Image (cartoon, rainbow, N blue to C red):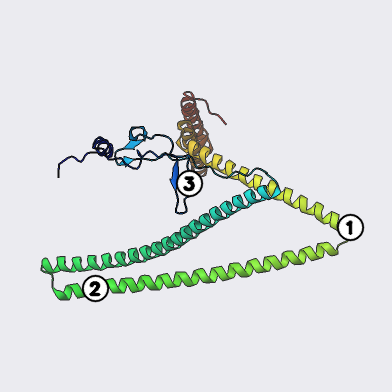
Amino acid sequence: MSAIRPGTASRLKSAQIQGKSGTACRVTDGAKTGARGRTLGGTTLNTMVCVEDRPITQQGLGGIKNPIRRPKRQIEDKSYFLGLLRGKINEINSEVGTITRQLVEKEEDNASFVQYEQMAEKLAYEIKELQGELGDYNTLVDKATLGNNITSIEMDLEDVRAANERAERNLEMLFEDRQRKESSLKSCELELKQEQEMSEIVIEEMVDTERERYFKLKDLNIHLLNQLSEGQMELERLNTRKAELEEELLTSPVNLKIINTCKINYSLNEFITNKRNETDPTQWVKRTMELVKNYNEHLKSSLASKPVIV
């Protein structure tokens, strides 16, 4: 067997050269005798057909394929369009079913994601607790490594346990206090709601003149409350300004001189009163004049540097 197999066309050509006529190259004489002597006429094989005229491929002879003619509807009536509409509806229903299945799958994935998230939170809490226990064990190992006695470690443990119990009791007390305050707040809110309902009932039972007067008084009350709030804000502002001015007065050098002068004046009056009771009038008048003169000079010297602003 040779390495290269000759093609079909080559084999047919060699067969024709050797004098063997193939099926495609047989020539009919236009008549065939039947069993009863009848002659059957033929028209398709009257033409001489050569192999070279046939289409040849690498796999051998290839027949000429006739184009496929699809049936086409000639009349586009109501039933035709109804059929098209049913086809589109079926496609839409199929697409809706596909989207619904995808949506169900996504919802299942979301539900599983929520479950996984809850599991992750639970595992994170367990990991946190285990980390706390590991820290306690590490502390115990460190103390044992440093040579601490078991008794001291147990004492530290008791101290920590007592501190935890105290903290737990304080937490319980705070929690109970919070519950009491919340219950008191709820009762107050309930009473306030009841009072509001009663006031609404009373307002509805009022005559027109009384109701009009009530609304006027209510508006006046709101206006007065606003004025009160503004007045309180203004009072706070004035108190702040007063504190600032008092601080400035305490640190101002001129005011310090005035304070010293007032102290000197008070001391002078007290001294004059005492001397009036001790000495005779002539000496008292002379001494008083000297003190007044000295006081005036001191006052002029203290006020000459900067004027006093009242």
Name of the residue lying farthest toward the front: 37
* Residue 63 visible in the current orientation: yes
Identified at 73% across, 64% down, the residue is 196
Q: CA distance from mark 1 to mark 2?
A: 77 Å
Name the element at disc 2.
Answer: helix
Whole-percent x, y for residue 205 in the image: 85, 64
Q: Nearer the viewer, residue 166 or 41?
A: 41
In the image, what residue occupies the spot 58% across and 70% down? 184
Q: Position of residue 164 (x, y in %)?
A: 33, 71
Residue 251 numbered tag: none
Residue at the spot of label 1: 208
Horizontal side, residue 189 vs residue 126: left or right: right
Nearest to the observer: residue 208 or residue 259: 208
Left or right of residue 297, residue 146 in this image? left
Residue linked to disc 2 = 157
Q: Circle 3 sits on which residue? A: 39
Report the residue at 19% width, 65% height from top.
Answer: 138
Q: Label 2 sits on what residue type?
A: Leu
